[in-house]
Image (spheres, grey):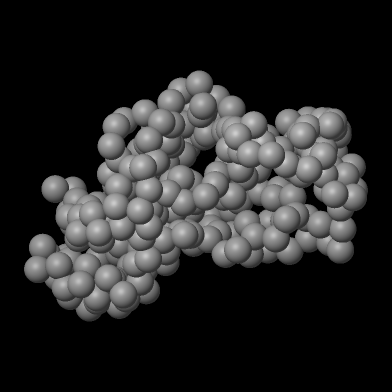
Amino acid sequence: MLTEVHVPDDVDAAVRLVSSGARALGGGTSLMPWLNDYASPPTELVSLRRAGLARIDVAGEAVTIGAATTLAQVEQDERLEILNPVVRSIASVPVRNLATVGGNLFARQPHGDLAVALVALDARVTLVGADGSRELPAGDDLPPFIVTRVAFALPAAGTFRYVKAARRRWNSASIVTVAAVVTESDGVVTAARVALGGVGPRVVRAHAVEAALVGGPLTEQAIGVAAEAGRSELAPADDAYASAWYRARVFPVHLRRALLGR
């Protein structure tokens, strides 16, 4: 039961309200349907839309995105062109006009595709609570604090790869999402950071896949070996979009498509 919506003008006021038991609200695209669909105790919300958290700063390779920045704003910023495939794979245009970067970090899998990309980009998340601020890697379990910003470094040109497999283009959850930053030198993979969505209860950092890729050429055979190594890291579930069996079965296909583009 929704009892009150607060709209504070700064982060400190928002923190005080959340510390007293209210829930932070970004765009509401995940939280509001959940409140409408499930019975809840008396609930106060804290809207962050006036708290000064909607901004994008790019200084050289360093990117900082405020938590209340919408996905549409990210898509419209030419400096963040590498994220266009990610953002455009998420829901529909009206949803992206509301959904926020910070809110996407809390989306339950198989949603939260931007979070998958941020893990691959080695992003750091800044949170503020009653006892101060802290910084955590994207993909970690986030405490019920207020996310204020996400920061990462733009990868070298051509090193970021992304594929989302879904039942339909708009408003569909992930079957398998693959985001990766792969660096090559003289035809050999020298570094790889791979994140997966849709194949577990949270975003998966695919360490076994990375280890299998590094040190050799990026070929179909090498990716097949890496996919087999990564099966132990998957923990998919059955849902309305796909079965756990199907997600595990097609994972190698989408890993190959992400890394080779075919």
Task: Tell me: residue 137, above or below residue 87.
Answer: below
Residue 125, image x, y percentages? 63, 57
Residue 12, image x, y percentages? 88, 46
On the question of residue 17 being in view, the answer is: yes
Total numbered badges shown on the rendered structure: 0
Residue 55, image x, y percentages? 65, 36
- Of all residues, the one furthest to the front in this rendering is 39
Location of residue 32 by image quarter:
top right
On the question of residue 251 being in view, the answer is: no
User: Camera-side residue: 74 or 241?
Assistant: 241
Location of residue 134 by image quarter:
bottom right
User: Along the horizontal axis of the image, is 178 left or right of 59?
Assistant: left
Task: Tell me: residue 74, above or below residue 159.
Answer: above
Q: Which residue is rendered at x = 28% and y = 44% of the image?
A: 165
User: Along the horizontal axis of the image, is 245 left or right of 72?
Assistant: left
Q: Which residue is rendered at x = 57% and y = 50% of the image?
A: 105
User: Camera-side residue: 245 or 163?
Assistant: 245
Q: Which residue is rendered at x = 28% and y = 37% of the image?
A: 167
User: Along the horizontal axis of the image, is 213 left or right of 118?
Assistant: left
